Image (cartoon, rainbow, N blue to C red):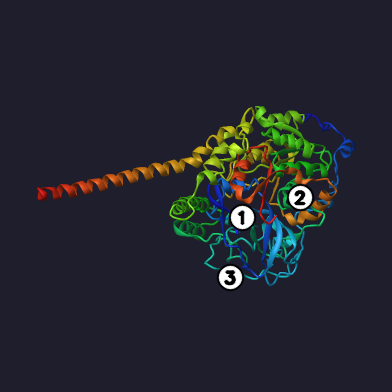
Amino acid sequence: MRAMVYRGPYRIRVEDKPRPVIEHPNDAIVRVTRAAICGSDLHLYHGMMPDTRVGMTFGHEFIGVVDEVGPSVRTVQAGDRVMVPFNIFCGTCFFCARGLYANCHNVNPNATAVGGIYGYSHTCGGYDGGQAEYVRVPLADVGPSSIPDWMDDEDAVLLTDAVATGYFGAQLGDIAEGDVVVVFGAGPVGLSAAASAWLMGAGRVIVIDHLEYRLAKARSFAHAETYNFAEYADVVVLMKELTDRIGADVAIDAVGAEADGNLLQHITSAKLKLQGGSPIALNWAIDSVRKGGTVSVMGAYGPMFSAVKFGDAMNKGLTLRMNQCPVKRQWPRLFEHVRNGYLKPRDLVTHRIPLEHIAEGYHIFSAKLDGCIKPLVVTDAA
Amino acid sequence: MAYTPHKPPNPETSEELRARIPGWGADLDPANRPAVPKEVYEPHPYGAVWEIPESQPEKWPRERSIEHASVTPVFGTSCPPRGASGLIRKLAYRRYSEGRAAHWLLLIAADRVDTVGSTARSFVSKHPDNPLIETGILAEVSHHGLRSRRHQKRADLIHQSLDPLIVAGPWVVAGLLGYRTVRRLGRSLRKVSRSRGAGRSPRAW
């Protein structure tokens, strides 16, 4: 089969790889029809995530058709059109039994701090991902779900991570009616978080980024008030001015490890790998939110330490909430929101790239060329 | 103002927002939010019929965090550890917990060793690495590289100029080292052949 393969920092290519096989009785093999490149894939692509091995196939956002199932699989069968959450989870460990599906303890021998994620380094379990023609889906009785007949493929693939994560991030903000919510980052997760904040009754939603085309999308997709931080001397002061010196009630970090806005932070993390991530957006969130407010962290960071301003967080009495999104738990309600037209995931898609040209897709997304917000990967099976 | 008890009013009221934004307030009641409460006890959700999943066979002694009691019942088999990078990875897993910086720094070092080794090996394979294709840099031409940056207030333009250095730097260094090695080898060979020739010449006379 054809599959995207990592060759080293900033280098990927498409190769022939053996088709995955059933390795566990509850495995399924899925023929991928649509995959997406996620902002967090760029951390792998840039060589920031420890234990990213040459030869790995990335991709944790994908949908497809079940091609084969293991002997113990009962809930899906060959031919089913399925969407697969980015989390691999067992459903029954201590953590899954409490709904923390992103924190499963039975699927990642390489680390206890993070669960299993498709195509996301060996630190996240060493599973190949879905930027390929076929992918192994472990514990198929628990993870994948049939795509509802009425749902568009592009909506479905966006619900496997980006939109679900944004929706989850807004929930972690504990938004109350009339709250002022500031979202740092106007990528697919930030845009989804901003749109979701309204569903939870926000009174004002502000989105901060430095890419004008993404801020335009924040205005149209998420009905948000927007500011380009590159045009202001100090974004924290801007936030205080916008809120009568109080600060936002809720701040959401939807940027993560490769944030811009502070050259020293960016270079020490994204370029020199001396930090687990560049916490610029997180520090802005801490300083922009009001005393007693809530910071929700949806941006992904590596396992190494990062220079986060915990002193300010403590002195302000903040609540910091974060997790990888337990995707499947969000789906029933998210499906309703998509069906009602409250959230329109496919409106985020800007590029549809054939698998054979995926290296260019990564460069376009990484360098933010051509108005790129969300690139999808289309296989020949689509 | 922050200096008085009152919260300033938002630019729009809830009624105005409900009229303007489709779905405004649909999840106002926390009971409608699937992530609330954080933990909900449901021991066998979806199709999980097991207490613990059956164990997947190990094709090689699977590296694991020493914070785990044993290898987990399900795991990925993407890229088994190999060569020098594999030895470094095994050391990182065997000796250091996830709480130690040494664990992660060794794994990052192993990643770099893996990249150098794999790139070198590719040149004696049927599929040598091609940085022009693999970096996707050709998209700069096909997808408006210049226009995407010109006249834009983008905060990433300063450090983007470092990317070519990071990507091309190792190739340039490797090329220079290769060139110097080949040149030295050539000189040594010429020296040897000259000295052999010099040794033979008296006899020839």
Q: Residue furthest front?
A: B205
Q: Is residue B30 visible?
A: no
The chain holding disc 1 is A
Q: Which residue is mark 1?
A: A119
- Callout 3: helix, strand or loop? loop
* Same-subunit check for callouts 1 and 2: yes
Instruction: Give the residue at mark 3.
Output: B57
Check disc 2 and report the residue beneath it: A155
Tell us which disc is closer to us: 3 or 2. Answer: 2
Mark 3–mark 2 Cα distance, whole angstroms, equals 36 Å
Q: Which of the pair B162/A205 is nearer the observer?
A: B162
Report crowding for label 3: few under 14, some 14 to 19, many 20 or more residues within 10 A (C-alpha): few
| Badge 1 amino acid | Gly
Q: Quadrant of residue A342?
A: top right
Tell me the mark number nearer the camera, choosing from 1 and 3: 1
Front of the two marks 1 and 2: 2
Residue B4: percent from the left, percent from the top?
Answer: 80, 29
Is A81 left or right of B114, judged from the image as shown? right
Q: CA distance from mark 1 to mark 3?
A: 20 Å
What amino acid type is highlighted by mark number 3? Pro
Q: Amino acid at mark 2?
A: Asp
Name the chain letter of the residue that bears numbered label 3: B
Q: CA distance from mark 1 to mark 2?
A: 21 Å
> On the rendered structure, is B14 left or right of A268?
right
> In the image, is A308 to the left or to the right of B121?
right
Compared with B79, B5 (above or below) is above
Residue B118 appears at what percent x and percent y?
Answer: 47, 53
